[in-house]
Amino acid sequence: MEKNVVNQSAIRKADPVSMLKQNAMLIVLVLVYIFFTIMTGGRMFRPNSFNSLINQNAYVFILGCGMLMCMLTGGNIDLSCGSVVCLLGALGATMMVMWGWGAGVSILLMLVVGLIYGCGLGAIIAYVRVPPWIATLAGYLAFRGLGTSILSVSVTNSISVKDNQAFLDIFSGTLFKTPEGEMNIPCIVVGIVAAALVVLVIFKNRATRLKKGYEVDELKMDVIKSVLGAAVIILVMYKLSLAGGIPTVLLWVAGVVLVYAFITSKTTVGRHFYVVGGNIEAARLSGVNTKRIMFIAYLNMAFLTSIAAMTTLARYTAANADAGKNFEMDAISACVVGGVSASGGAGTVLGMVIGATLIGVINLGMFQVNLDANYQRVVKGFVLLAAVVFDILSKKKQK
Amino acid sequence: MNENKMSVSAFFQKYTMIIALVVVVIFFAIITGGKNLLPGNINNLIAQNAYVFVLAAGMLLCILTGGNIDLSVGSVVCFTAAIGCVLMDNDVNMWVAVLAMLAIGLLIGAFQGFWIAKLHVPAFIATLSGMYAFRGFSNVVLGGYQVSISNETFLNLFGGGANCYIPDFIRQAMGTEGKPNLTCLAIGLVAVLIFIGLKLRKILIQKKLNIHQSIPAQLATTAIISAVVIWLTFKLANHKGFPTVLIWIGLVLGIYQYITTKTAMGRHLYAVGGNEKATALSGVKTRNVYWFAYASMGLMAGLAGILTAARAKGIDPTYGEGYEMDAIASCFIGGASAYGGVGKVSGMIIGAVLMGVINQGMNIVGVDSNFQKVVKGLVLLLAVVFDVLSKRQKR
Amino acid sequence: MAKILLEMKNITKTFPGVKALDNVNFQVEEGEIHALVGENGAGKSTLMNVLSGIYPYGTYTGDIIYDGKVCQFHNIKDSEKLGIVIIHQELALVPEMTIGENMYLGNERGHKLAIDWNTTYSEADKYLKMVGLSESSKTQVKDIGTGKQQLVEIAKALAKQARLLILDEPTSSLNEEDSRALLDLMLGFKKQGMTMIIISHKLNEVAYVADKITVVRDGATIETIDNHGTEPVSEERIIKGMVGREMTNRFPKREGVTVGDIQLEVDNWTVHHPLYPERKVVDNVSMYVRKGEVVGIYGLMGAGRTELAMSIFGQTYGVNITGTMKIDGKEVKIKKGADDAIKHKIAYVTEDRKGNGLVLSQSIKVNTSLAHLDAISNHMVIDGDKEYAVAEEYRAKLKTKTPSVEQLVGNLSGGNQQKVLLAKWMFAEPDIMLLDEPTRGIDVGAKYEIYCIINDLAAAGKCVVMISSELPEVLGMSDRIYIMNEGKFVGEMKASEATQENIMALILQSGRGD
């Protein structure tokens, strides 16, 4: 082992085996993607597929962030988010269509209702100490019912919001829309800027670490990291540019993911989430208000659920009684597949994003190869189980 | 110990759910003008909730092990029922089909239990994946369509169709017809007599061994339970007789009551939920305990699949959705602890009946079915909040 | 000479990276009480776990010869069949179940598929009488006190037809009176021909009850001392074996420390039990600590020491806390919660570092900064570089042995974990440090380093309260000693005046006073 001498950075040698292990899910993702690209004769690689991947899975990324925070506190989950998506969608549609309110007011009120629910749920879990999955199970039952009964004013149990263009533009529109097949310049520009930012951040970080004498990775590792990161971003944006431009929902997703990545890795509150999940007693005795953390976890979950409800409503241009069904399962799966510990205290937003993308790719791929919808569910189930078993086994070996 | 001098508040705490049940029954009796107590409705209450009793019995064991649950039961019910229906649709012998359904249920339970017990995969994740997978499999087996059952014996035996009652042998022998159904009354009477006999024997043994238990209290509960059973059979006798499905419910509840109170495995279930480490140090193989709980849950899901298929005279791919919630809710309303180690079959029965009575009452009154879900959720939440708070007060 | 009931030959047991037992030989004669003594982590419990089959045959090397036969135990059941029954330090009872159910857990009466409850309860009552308990076996375990729970454990062992009874720290959570009763019960069993092994760190009890004393150190049996003489073996004699040298230089000298003004003062402090609010856990305690002073609080486990410290530390333990607290002469009211205590510059270093001290699944860095995140963050945003630097600083200062501060705490040895725990609280920059059993479960070398750290803290003008149940440590490290028993302070003395004898005498007197 090299010794740390002040002002001379140790170089962390790249170890292929541990690299593979750390990035197992990423590699699986790439392999699965290649597999489906071959199986579909390249359809997976067409611009439209990129577009659907983002549109179809937006809610998974958004809810995944919230679920990650809940799971960090000790493997707790929220089973109610799918039903709440249905309820809020129904409320929003009622406000916009039945009562003719504007998009802005309706969005605000949806958010307010979501937050009130979050406060109630958080209080019951954090202060009354009802086990989270029971409290949210009750919500799962109740809010689906409430949402459906709101929608039952219409014969089809569905209220269409397709006339509220403002609302649709905000959550499911396209920025600087151009015809399909034509290169969308703003989209490409955004892609290049984002890629440049990624490279900049990686190397700036390296520079400060070197200056202060901290351990750094080998130079080639950082180069590979930045080249890969930049390439993926530019590729995605290039494909999107051919599909008409940047979908607004991507901005929502990117915004949420970046904010939560920052919160979990850089802030004291984020740190508290990990510590509460790691050892709640130690956290309490170190001055962490553990009850407040639990409260925040579920309030935050409700907040993100509200956003997911809006994107879902916009995507289907209607509030349906079925909206949000199984969303909770998708969010949980994304976390678990992305390496979030089912017993709390470990997991990252990046991991969750990879997990969500993997599930999204599998879903889209199965759809495109015309796999029976029912087998798709079976595959989903086994992917989830396999991910957890993998997680547990790999931890066992480490010990 | 002064069991005779139970304070009023302790009495209410112990029997809250029973009192709640009585209040709810009276409430709906008033609102519906006594409709909910009509023989036909009592019969429906049993038939509609048969799967709840069966699944909740299995679920109770899972919950006892430490607040673990099985989310897959709804899908497994659908899957086993689908297999059975397809088999019978292809003229496979009914008994083979029944056995296949039970065996598949058991296998699925053992499979999920394997991951939970051996690898410590969190129960909710293992069963969540089962929930996805078996819903998908059911669709595959059914090809997305409804499959119906025409096998009369199957229907009669497992509580479906118009003739799912024990024929009135006594009146047949007497050559008369009409109501009340004497066989039904006889079954009720015999059951009560056996029950009273067992209780008296127990009291006598206790006296002989000088174990102190309040005898008047025991006699009182025996009398109340006997009266309820007699009243129930009387109602049923005035409908169409003793429903066959009640035999299965009775059998399951009896066996689970026995398992939880009289067997070593039953003790171990409570012990694992109460203090897993202590249990392991007492030489109990805790893995097997988890395994047992989930295998038994699978078997019950298989049986519930049979009952569901029979009652609906067939199966379609959406059946069984939300069943896990009903089972879980019954257990918690019946006083099972969300942290494991506490809970009784008798409590679970009361929980299931309470949920059933509320559902049916709302149906009769004509409450919107969506709103019923809201009530269900609230009742579940209230039950658990009550449980958590009352425990906190005790401390 | 009596027959050898048990012989353990050349037992070696390795855990990943550690040789817990190294070629251990151990003999027990039939009908004797044999004590196993040694420091924490010396390997006593590991040896007994090998014997009872918790570490099954095949995971260790060497032979167990019991009753003349070589045995291979694959689980607890195997050893229990032969009458080897172990009673663990942490009670193996399920609180929600009755005494009777607990006693026959895993050993049910009647048939497996038909438990005979009447036999269970009547037999249970019989064994309860044998251990002197008058409770009905239908009482729930959570409704009886720890002392009685320990007796239930013994009754449980008797119900398994124990021939060789192993008691691991049976008196660690008992008060003096209950402990004495338990030891006398053991002597009673001996008369009836039972063989027993007792693991204990209370040397006075060992000397009182044991026929032979085997000393274990660093995974090896060092010597076996005969205790048949007219005078019981002296504790110094045993300690010498345990430590491996005379105890003159076990404690580093504290030099150049000037004891200053009173910093912490607590008066008439009373704390009630959170679950049983009528019970006083700390009873009218008054104490003070000066700057630069190390004050020892000695007492047996369960005396209320931890509860006292935690109640001072932001009421993190107890309810209905009354009394006054002054810091630097000014009365302060600390709100409930550790955060307010930290703001008042108090730190509590827990006795249970794995249970409620450290987050084992996180890195050294994260643990070090945990109690004082504000200092390395700006508007709630953590400065990662600063955090790293802080962790490095304390790693170097406390000489924590680790490849990097990114290492997970769970991978460190006990001594190094203790250093990370200390680092966390030193980084919180407290003026008052409450150290609860700061050297529990760490080896002698690491202990010495911890003592040095304590001296440094005192030299920096902090006031240090050191809670310990190891008398030599209290005597060697403190300037002043409070003696605590059953929730009360029963004495205060200068370290220079204190001896083991007069401290133990104070505790015994106070016990009799009730």
Image (cartoon, coloured by chain):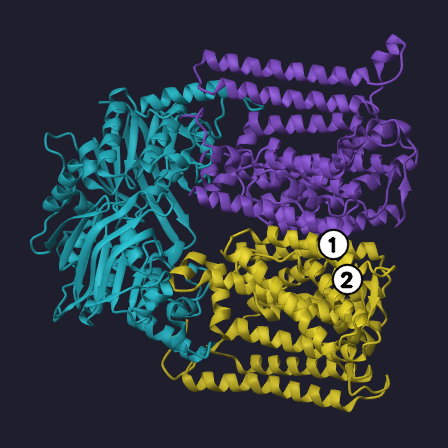
Looking at the picture, how far across and down is residue B271, in whole percent? 50, 36
Image chain in yellow: A
* C400 on left or right of C249: right
Q: Quickly name the residue at label 1.
A: A145
> Number of labelled discs?
2
Q: Colour of chain B?
A: purple
Label 2 neighbourhood size at 10 Å, few (<14), some (14-19), many (20+)? many
Mark sitting on residue A323: 2
Which numbered mark, 2 or 1, is in the foreground of this view? 1
Q: Secondary structure at mark 1?
A: helix
Q: What's the CA distance linking mark 2 and mark 1?
A: 12 Å
Which chain, by letter, is cyan? C
Tell me which amino acid carries mark 2.
Ala
Q: Position of residue B23 (x, y in %)?
A: 64, 36
In the image, which disc is placed on residue A64? none
**Vertical placement of A133 versus A224: above or below?**
above
